[in-house]
Amino acid sequence: MSGLLHTGGLSAVFLPTPTMFLIDEKITVRRLEVLLAFLEAGTIARAAEQLGTSAVSVHRALKSLEEGLRCPLFLQEGRHLVPQESARELAEAAKETIRTLQHGIDAAREAGGYSSDQLRIGSMYSLTIRLVPRLLVELKVHQPAMQIDLVLDSNEKLLQKLRGGHIDAALIELPQEQPDDLEVLPIFDDELMFAAPMDWQGSDSSVVDLERCSKERFVSLTDDFATGRDMQRMLAKAGFDADIVMRTGDIFSLMSLVSGGVGCSLLPARAKEVFSDKIQWFSLEPPYRHSQRIGLVCMKSRERSPNVLSLLRACRIVRTQLEKEGPTSG
């Protein structure tokens, strides 16, 4: 049968037929993902931010799609690309294609014994006020079948759990120097503020000089929490050993202690949303100001895991949203 077709007394020899590709090689899944990110973000710069790549790479990917389609997707207006109806039609097909492909990948991993629809995220307690819910909503939009376990703990213990393989990623105050074994994605910066009971009269303005608070009683988180450790450093910088009357293991208990008049504390601005009417909040004088850089960390050995990639993408989307909303929206 090797290429021979017998027709009566005649025989015909068929040469191998070249492989026929129905889709141009310039139309790739990656470039379709870039198209979707661009339409969602509205600009090339924001799409690049979400995807963790450069604006040049995004622009190149979009032009390659046009070349592969042999059809314009955008109009150039000054420095901006304006999507046409053709781009929106392709985007709808791309969503379905990527969804179908993801199902196929999941099925292949399951058949190979590598399937897992579970993602274990560690977080500081204070990030459950707003950041964590927004991330979970974003994840569920793109990965509705994903099962998410949330582990709440201190910065130090979350890093231990991450390196021990007990969680897949952690939302924490980022270390000042990036460890070699971790992939780091900053999300937002948050200022530490002076928090006092409602009847406290230690300042007649919206700003507190920390050096003048040496006689105050303080309550604090334990030192394995980022905010507790930062508070110790700031008090030391103010030049006094604080009278810390109580330490606690979660920020919500700490805020209750402040509102109950047990003592003052230093708390991140993101906590104002919960106790804005029960605690006085003051900015600090410039020498004592400190901002926490909040972000996601994962092991570099796990950064290409599909679930971790989905989480990184969700973090970039939420980061863009927070940047639009302003500095205290984290």
Image (spheres, rainbow, N blue to C red):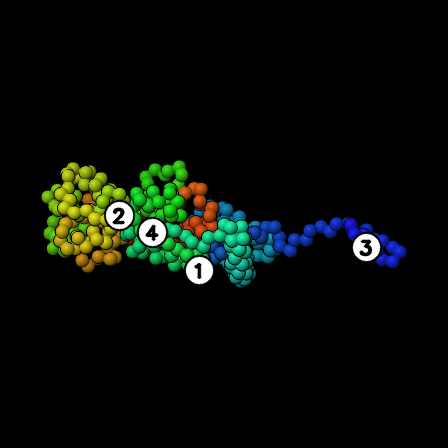
* Residue beneath the point at 87% across and 55% down: 10
* Residue beneath the point at 34% across and 42% down: 160
Camera-near label (3 vs 2) is 3
Q: Residues within 10 Å of mark 4 (few under 14, many from 20)?
A: some
The span from disc 1 to disc 4 (Cα, nearest Å) is: 20 Å
Taking 69 as reference, is 170 left or right?
left
Tag shown at residue 151: 4
Q: Earlier in the sequence, mark 3 or mark 2?
A: 3
The span from disc 4 to disc 3 (Cα, nearest Å) is: 67 Å
Q: Earlier in the sequence, mark 4 or mark 3?
A: 3
Query: Mark 3 near mark 2, Cβ–Cβ under 8 Å?
Result: no
Q: Residue furthest right?
A: 9
Amino acid at dot 1: Pro
The span from disc 3 to disc 2 (Cα, nearest Å) is: 79 Å
Camera-near label (1 vs 4) is 4
Query: Mark 1 near mark 3, Cβ–Cβ under 8 Å?
Result: no
The span from disc 1 to disc 3 (Cα, nearest Å) is: 52 Å
Q: Quadrant of residue 233?
A: top left
Taking 132 as reference, is 32 left or right?
right
- For label 3, the SS is strand
- For label 4, the SS is strand
Percent of width and height locating residue 314? 41, 53
Camera-near label (4 vs 2) is 4
Residue 39, above or below 227 = below
Amino acid at dot 2: Glu
- For label 2, the SS is strand
Tag shown at residue 5: 3
The span from disc 2 to disc 1 (Cα, nearest Å) is: 34 Å
Tag shown at residue 191: 2
Query: Mark 4 near mark 2, Cβ–Cβ under 8 Å?
Result: no
The span from disc 4 to disc 2 (Cα, nearest Å) is: 24 Å
